[in-house]
Amino acid sequence: MDTYHISGGNRLEGSCRVNGAKNAVLPILAASLMGKGGSRIKNCPGLSDVYAMISILESTGCAIDFKSGIIDISPKNIQNAEISEELMSSLRSSIFLMGPMLAVCGEFTAGYPGGCAIGSRPIDMHIYALRILGAEIEETDGKIRCRSGRLTGGEIKFPAVSVGATENAMMAAALAQGTTVIKNAAREPEIAELERFLNCMGASVKGAGTGTITIEGRKDLQGCEFSVMPDRIEAGTILAAVAATGGEVLLTEAPVREMKNITKVLRKSGCHVHGEGSFIYMKAPKRLRSAGYIETNPYPGFPTDMQSQIMTLMCVSEGSGVICENIFEQRFQTAPYLKKMGADIRIDGKYAFIKGKEKLFGARLRAEDLRGGAALVIAALCAQGESYIENVCLIDRGYDKLDMMLKNLGANIQRIKEE
Ligand code: UD1
């Protein structure tokens, strides 16, 4: 597995274009198999999760071509409604196939989805939603077996907020007979993006971005051409890396409005942040101050996907901070590595108590999950000395050549390929 070698201490400065959003493109790819014709999806990032999703779609019979950020997908020859365990476990978002495959083929058999080990990550709410729409679902021998005739609309009241279950329900309902109302829906910007994509295919979806989404099912959907929104977490990660090194950056093609919960925290940390149109300019002070208390919550709350990166910033800020992680129970896996670098962190259940230190020191580290890996890259960039971060493949799930983006801003980072 590849390793990043980072010599810390360089101040990051320059400009950087934000790539298409991982959490938008993955459900969009799954939804595209519901089109009668082919779709062209633009601004797609070259992430290992995107390649894994492409392999899964190809295994069902879709023809796919991915070049220069454009994915052409032709779902004409879908023949296989069974996804192998190996493919299913390659990413969490493989579960997005459940709704569309049921809607198109009336059946779906698969193992359980994989993804980063950041918590138990059950799929009970996905199953609950599809059962309401008429699917018969059995879970036996480590497999999920689903069957249905044409799905029928219904009222889905989620007991808790789930991004993925909301998206699965939206996709299945788009081809169901009648009206579906989803209550307690997730409000993430990527849900609104999926609504735009489905409507572009000819669906009738309203209300994404609020807690209630209404879908009038259609008999069929068409292929379409669509450009994916920029990635707010990639943009936030770059801002955090620049902030950690006391640098200055101009982000272009940034989702400014959707990042308010992130830029607010950076301002609290002492950074000057100005967002306008699709640009974000940020200048960090020489020494950050602690953002104080951060609590992760569903959108518009502070995103769990930025929690680890902000923890790194708190480790080198003036003053103390507290993080409360409300979404995933194993999202403090980076803390032991930060402590190895000299950070002062105490974990107590879903709370992390952090006392800022003047400096961190380079060390041998390992990415345990995607965002935690990015947080270690940030720590290594501002640390004194050399760091090695193993298991870069987890970082590749959600960042398209993170090393090159940081190098362009002046970082001293090398990817060491495994022999
Ligand atoms: C999505 C994002 C991920 C982000 C997460 C939370 C994608 C591809 N991934 O993941 O980057 O960190 O939202 O913002 O969009 N849960 C259940 N039962 C279910 C489903 C979820 O209990 O059936 C729980 C989860 O364990 C978690 C919480 O609900 O505690 C939220 O998870 P969810 O919003 O579903 O996350 P994902 O869709 O997997």
Image: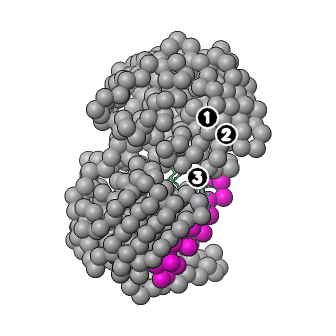
- Where is residue 171? Give x, y as percent: 39, 68
Q: Locate the N terminus and report the quarter of the image it occupies.
A: top right
Q: Amino acid at mark 2?
A: Cys
- Where is residue 126? Give x, y as percent: 53, 68
Q: Gap between marks 3 and 1, in whole Å?
A: 22 Å
Residue drawn at x 48%, y 73% as measured from the top left: 155
Q: Which residue is mark 1?
A: 294
Q: Which residue is mark 2?
A: 324
Asked if the magenta segment contains residue 132, the reply would be yes
Q: CB under 8 Å between callouts 1 and 2?
A: yes
Q: Amino acid at mark 3?
A: Cys
Residue 84 is at least partly visible in this image? no
Which tag, 3 or 2, sits closer to the chain's start? 3
Residue lying at the far top in this picture: please name it: 286
Q: Element at badge 2?
A: strand
Q: Which residue is mark 3?
A: 116
How packed is label 3: few (under 14 Cα within 10 Å), some, or many (20 or more)?
Answer: some
| Vertical placement of residue 72 versus 399, above or below | below
In front: 182, or 332?
182
